[in-house]
Image (spheres, rainbow, N blue to C red):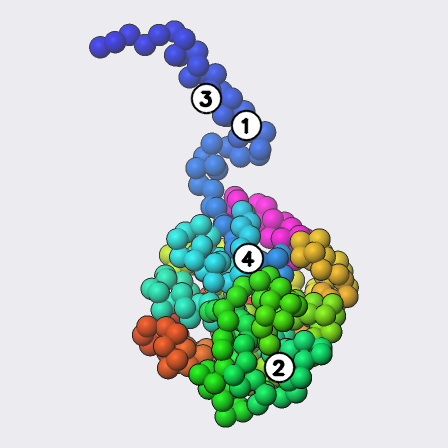
C-alpha cells in the first residue's frame, strides 16, 4: 500500500472546506444540495414562458422548495421538443404540430396543459404589392412555411377550404428568419406564419392577409413535460402551471408592460408585440376532451399527408391532472 502524502490531505481538506463554504454562502447545506431538484425549462423568445422568466415568477414561487431553475432558449417548437426528448429540458411550450411530430418519433413526452385557442395569431400572407387577391390565386405559387409547425396544419386547412391540395402549390420549407428574407425579396409568393413574425410582417412590410386561422384551426399552445419527470414531481409541475396561469392573467391586464418585457429579447417594437399579444389565448387550462379531439384531427391530417410515419394516439400522451389549472 502506497503512503498518502501530506500534500494530498491538505488539498483534500482545503477542497472540502471550500465546497462546504460555497454551499453555506449559497444558502444550501450539503444535504440540500444532494436533494436539490433541477428544473430545466425550454422557452422561445416570444410567448408566456419568456415573460415568466423575465419576471422571475417561478424563482419566487419555488424559492423555499430547494429547486434550481435553468432556462434554455430554443429557436422554435420542434427544436425545443427535441431538447425535451434528449433530456436537456424537462418542460416547455410549443404549438399544436411539434408535439405530434415528437410523439410520432417516440418521444417520451406528456401534454400537461394548454392555452385557449388563438386562431387569429397565424395567417397566410402576401406582399403588399402582390397580384394575389385570394387563396385560389395561389395555385402553382411558392408558399414558405416552417416544416412541422402550427402553420403546416393551417396551410392544409386553408387549401382544403378552397378546394385545393398541397400538390397544387409549391411548398418551400424555411425557418421564420429565412422565410422573411425570401418573402421580402420575392423569392416566395406567400408565407404562412405565426405571431410575432406575422405582426412584424404586417407592420414593417405592409403584408396583406389572404387567410387567418379563424374558423379553420384552433391554434393552441401546449405545455409539455418529460413523462418521467412529471410522474416524479407532480406537485412541482402543478406549481409551474399555476404560475403560468397567473402570468397569463397578468399579461391580459398589463399588455403594454408585457410587450416591454419582450422588446429586448425579441428585438421587436412594443407596437408589434402589443399587436401579437392582443391575439393570444389567455389562461392555462387542463386539457379537455375537446382539445384532445382537435389535436387528434391535426395528427390524423399529418398522417394522411404522409408527414408522420404512423398514426398516433394523442390521448395516450395526456397527463392526468392532479389539481385544476383553470382560472
Helix, strand or loop at label 2? It is strand
Mark 3 surroundings: few (<14), some (14-19) or many (≥20) residues within 10 A: few
Tell me the distance, in whole angstroms, between the alpha carbons under discs 3 and 2: 61 Å
In this figure, which residue is indicated by the disc labeled 4?
A: 75
Helix, strand or loop at label 1? It is helix
In this figure, which residue is indicated by the disc labeled 1?
A: 22
> Closer to the camera, 126 or 200?
126
Mark positioned earlier in the residue sequence (3 or 1): 3
In the picture, measured across the screen, residue 114 lies left or right of residue 212, that is left
> Closer to the camera, 13 or 182?
182
Mark positioned earlier in the residue sequence (4 or 3): 3
Helix, strand or loop at label 3? It is helix
Judge whether residue 243 can be spotted in this image. no
> Closer to the camera, 188 or 207?
188
In this figure, which residue is indicated by the disc labeled 3?
A: 16
Residue 61 on the magenta span: yes
Judge whether residue 210 can be spotted in this image. yes
Mark positioned earlier in the residue sequence (2 or 1): 1
Mark positioned earlier in the residue sequence (4 or 1): 1
In this figure, which residue is indicated by the disc labeled 2?
A: 212
Callout 3–callout 2 Cβ contact below 8 Å: no
Mark positioned earlier in the residue sequence (2 or 4): 4
Tell me the distance, in whole angstroms, between the alpha carbons under discs 3 and 1: 10 Å
Tell me the distance, in whole angstroms, between the alpha carbons under discs 2 and 4: 23 Å
Tell me the distance, in whole angstroms, between the alpha carbons under discs 4 and 3: 40 Å
Tell me the distance, in whole angstroms, between the alpha carbons under discs 2 and 1: 54 Å
Helix, strand or loop at label 4? It is loop
Q: Is residue 144 above or below residue 37?
A: below
Residue 302 on the magenta span: no
Find the residue positioned furthest to the bottom. 163
Amino acid at each position: 500500500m502506497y503512503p498518502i502524502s501530506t500534500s494530498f490531505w491538505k488539498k483534500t481538506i482545503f477542497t472540502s472546506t471550500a465546497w462546504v463554504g460555497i454551499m453555506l454562502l449559497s444558502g444550501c447545506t450539503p444535504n440540500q444540495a444532494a436533494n436539490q431538484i433541477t428544473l430545466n425549462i425550454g422557452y422561445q423568445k416570444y410567448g408566456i414562458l419568456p415573460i415568466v422568466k423575465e419576471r422571475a415568477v417561478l424563482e419566487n414561487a419555488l424559492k423555499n422548495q430547494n429547486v434550481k431553475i435553468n432556462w434554455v432558449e430554443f429557436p422554435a417548437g420542434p427544436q425545443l421538443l427535441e431538447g425535451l426528448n434528449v433530456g436537456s429540458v424537462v418542460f416547455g411550450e410549443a404549438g399544436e404540430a411539434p408535439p405530434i411530430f415528437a410523439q410520432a418519433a417516440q418521444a417520451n413526452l406528456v401534454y400537461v396543459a394548454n392555452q385557449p385557442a388563438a386562431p387569429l395569431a397565424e395567417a397566410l400572407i402576401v406582399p403588399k404589392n402582390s397580384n394575389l387577391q385570394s387563396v385560389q390565386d395561389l395555385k402553382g405559387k411558392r408558399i414558405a412555411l416552417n416544416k412541422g409547425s402550427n402553420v403546416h396544419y393551417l396551410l392544409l386547412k386553408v387549401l382544403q377550404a378552397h378546394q385545393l391540395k398541397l400538390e397544387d402549390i409549391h411548398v418551400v420549407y424555411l425557418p421564420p428568419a429565412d422565410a422573411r428574407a425570401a418573402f421580402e425579396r420575392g423569392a416566395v409568393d406567400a408565407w404562412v406564419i405565426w405571431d410575432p413574425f406575422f405582426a412584424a410582417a404586417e407592420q414593417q412590410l405592409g403584408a396583406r392577409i389572404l387567410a387567418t386561422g379563424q374558423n379553420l384551426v384552433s391554434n393552441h399552445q401546449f405545455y409539455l413535460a418529460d413523462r418521467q419527470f412529471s410522474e416524479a414531481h407532480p406537485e412541482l409541475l402543478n406549481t409551474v402551471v399555476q404560475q403560468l396561469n397567473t402570468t397569463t392573467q397578468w399579461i391580459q391586464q398589463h399588455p403594454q408592460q408585457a410587450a416591454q418585457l419582450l422588446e429586448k429579447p425579441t428585438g421587436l417594437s412594443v407596437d408589434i408585440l402589443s399587436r401579437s399579444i392582443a391575439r393570444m389565448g389567455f389562461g392555462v387550462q387542463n386539457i379537455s376532451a375537446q382539445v384532445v379531439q382537435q389535436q387528434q384531427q391535426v395528427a390524423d391530417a399529418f398522417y394522411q399527408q404522409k408527414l408522420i410515419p404512423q398514426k398516433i394516439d394523442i390521448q395516450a400522451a395526456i397527463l392526468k391532472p392532479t389539481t385544476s389549472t383553470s382560472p
